[in-house]
Image: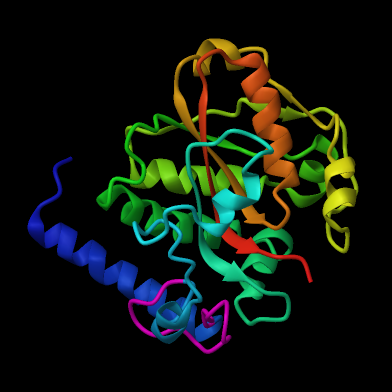
């Protein structure tokens, strides 16, 4: 059945009414300041969006940004960026906690889609044809119910339809949480944890991919994933993106 303008207007009104009733019963709150969100606000209020500690790593002003420096000499990458700075105890750290532990991964999808649109406009994503999420071991996947990196990857694909999501890395061994570990401990912790999927070489050969995770601290997890892909896939180029970039305390 074809929707007439009157029917579409009525449907929009009904949706707005349902949203309004939902906000009365269970008000949506900003993930950072926890104030009730206003009309037209999603996940974060306008004030918190405006004050987000953005890295600006994608800017041409950065010839060799701190995230790219992090991977220099460890694994060959084309470029790397993160949306915002992560500092433990900062109000914006709650975004990552919500995404990973409080069952709101779509917050990450929304933020990554917004960021990917910005990157596409300036040509940062030019040449990239696939986005590959860092995998989650089946034991963590069973307890959490989702892989937040996969949902971030989908945010990129939603912003840029020419980029497809390919789960080309698998977690073959569970590892302890990286939290509270130093750089050397983190690197050892993920050794032998990842492997390319059986079809990785076929699907990714001679392509430029975007490897995605929620937060980068020492870069050990992303480095380990990149290494197994580079060893298995001929002609592969890798760039890296995350929601947040952090440094160890």
Name the main secondary structure of what is drawn in magenta.
loop
Q: Is residue 9 left or right of residue 186?
A: left
Queried whether the magenta region covers residue 81, the answer comes back as no
**Eyeballing the image, is 105 above or below 13?**
above
Picture coordinates of residue 237, whole percent (x, y)? 50, 27
| Highlighted magenta segment, given as a residue range | 27-42
Quadrant location, the C terminus: bottom right
Q: Please name the residue shown 48% across and 43% down the image.
A: 79
Residue found at the far top of this picture: 202
Check the image and report above or below for 176 versus 167.
Answer: below
Q: Is residue 36 magenta?
A: yes
Q: Is residue 135 visible?
A: no
Of residue 119 and residue 167, the one placed in the foreground of this image is 119
- Residue 147 as seen in the image, left or right of residue 154: right
Residue 53 can be seen in this image:
yes
> In this view of the protein, which residue sits in the foreground, 86 or 197?
86
Residue at the spot x=60%, y=57% of the render? 105
Q: Quadrant of residue 202?
A: top right
């Amino acid at each position: 059945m074809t929707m007439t303008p009157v029917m579409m207007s009525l449907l929009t009104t009904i949706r707005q009414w349902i949203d309004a009733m939902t906000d009365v019963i269970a008000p949506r709150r900003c993930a950072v300041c926890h104030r009730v969100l206003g009309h037209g606000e999603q996940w974060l209020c306008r004030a918190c969006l405006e004050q987000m500690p953005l890295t600006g790593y994608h800017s041409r002003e950065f010839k060799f940004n701190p995230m790219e420096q992090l991977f220099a000499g460890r694994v060959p990458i084309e470029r790397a960026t993160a949306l915002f700075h992560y500092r433990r105890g900062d109000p914006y750290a709650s975004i990552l906690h919500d995404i990973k532990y409080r069952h709101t991964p779509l917050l990450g999808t929304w933020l990554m889609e917004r960021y990917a649109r910005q990157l596409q406009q300036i040509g940062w994503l030019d040449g990239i044809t696939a986005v590959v999420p860092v995998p989650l071991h089946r034991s963590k996947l069973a307890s959490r119910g989702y892989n937040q990196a996969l949902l971030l990857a989908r945010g990129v694909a939603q912003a840029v339809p020419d980029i497809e999501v390919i789960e080309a890395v698998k977690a073959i061994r569970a590892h302890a949480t990286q939290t509270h570990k130093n750089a050397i401990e983190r690197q050892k912790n993920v050794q032998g944890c990842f492997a390319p999927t059986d079809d990785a070489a076929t699907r990714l050969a001679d392509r430029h991919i975007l490897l995605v995770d929620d937060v980068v601290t020492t870069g050990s997890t992303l480095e380990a994933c990149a290494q197994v892909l580079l060893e298995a896939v001929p002609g592969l180029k890798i760039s890296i993106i995350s929601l947040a970039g952090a440094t160890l305390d």
